[in-house]
Image (cartoon, helix red, strand yellow):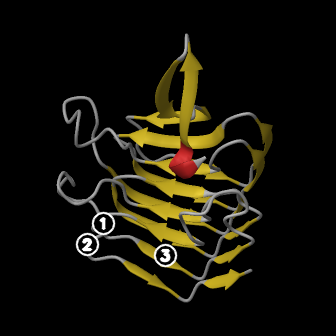
């Protein structure tokens, strides 16, 4: 699924949405998910979708999910500012994981992760097309990740895919295979 989007058919009409997650952390502060094995899900695994701060996701194995292994932020933030708050200070490090999706967020570090055999991108960063980006979006550091066999099903993307302005961000020293 592209950035975890899904399209449902109901009574001959299409309805789009975001794939649900098994574990949702909203309005969370100082949460750590460490040394877990999460597998065989018909959804995404971890979702830090709204108002999550000071989060550490370290040393996990997340595999065999229908969606992303980790999602941060919400694509709805600029359109529903009364309902959604920017997620900040998120560390995603030393995981073996299916995919990472970061919509709108500030201060996300994605370091030393392994991702392979993904239907879409290994890491998706950003959302929107620059006209509605919330203040504080950006400040992302994406370094030393190993992303192989990305884009196994879809064609519009890459191992690391960015969309919209990611102010004060750095993407460096990552390895891409196939």
How far apart are labels 1 and 3 at the CA level?
A: 11 Å
Residues at discs 1 and 3 in contact (Cβ within 8 Å): no
Q: Quadrant of residue 154?
A: bottom right
Q: Residue at x 55, y 44 (%)?
A: 4
* Residue underneath mark 1: 138
Asked whether 18 or 86 is in front, the reply is 18
- Label ID, residue 7: none
How far apart are labels 2 and 3 at the CA level?
A: 13 Å
In the picture, measured across the screen, residue 115 lies left or right of residue 107, that is right
Above or below, 9 relative to 77: above
Q: Which residue is drawn at 47% across and 52% down?
A: 55
Asked whether 76 or 73 is in front, the reply is 76
Crowding at dot 2, Cα within 10 Å, few <14 / some 14-19 / many 20+, comes out as few
SS class of the residue under badge 3? strand
Q: In which quarter of the image is residue 35?
A: bottom right
Q: Quadrant of residue 42?
A: top right
Above or below, 165 relative to 153: below
* Residue underneath mark 2: 167
Query: What is the residue that sits farthest to the top in this orientation?
Result: 11
SS class of the residue under badge 2? loop
Crowding at dot 1, Cα within 10 Å, few <14 / some 14-19 / many 20+, comes out as many
The total of numbered circles placed on residues is 3
Query: What is the residue that sits farthest to the front in this orientation?
Result: 12
In the picture, measured across the screen, residue 94 lies left or right of residue 165, that is right
How far apart are labels 2 and 1 at the CA level?
A: 5 Å
Query: Residue 128: image x %, image y %?
Result: 30, 53
Crowding at dot 3, Cα within 10 Å, few <14 / some 14-19 / many 20+, comes out as many
Q: Which residue is drawn at 55% across and 10% down?
A: 11
* Residue underneath mark 3: 142
User: Who comes first in sequence, dot 2 or dot 3?
Assistant: 3
């Amino acid at each position: 699924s592209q950035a975890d989007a899904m399209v449902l058919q109901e009574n001959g009409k299409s309805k789009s949405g975001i794939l649900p997650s098994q574990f949702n952390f909203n309005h969370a502060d100082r949460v750590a998910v460490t040394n877990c094995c999460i597998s065989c899900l018909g959804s995404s695994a971890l979702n830090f979708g709204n108002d999550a701060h000071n989060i550490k996701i370290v040393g996990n194995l997340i595999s065999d999910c229908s969606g992303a292994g980790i999602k941060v932020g919400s694509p709805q933030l600029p359109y529903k500012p009364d309902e959604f708050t920017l997620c900040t200070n998120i560390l995603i490090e030393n995981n073996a994981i299916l995919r990472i999706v970061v919509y709108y967020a500030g201060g996300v570090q994605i370091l030393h992760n392994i991702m392979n055999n993904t239907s879409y991108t290994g890491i998706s960063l950003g959302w929107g097309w620059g006209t509605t980006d919330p203040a504080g979006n950006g400040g992302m550091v994406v370094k030393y990740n190993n992303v192989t066999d990305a884009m196994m099903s879809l064609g519009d993307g890459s191992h690391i895919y960015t969309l919209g302005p990611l102010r004060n961000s750095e993407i460096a020293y990552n390895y891409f295979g196939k």
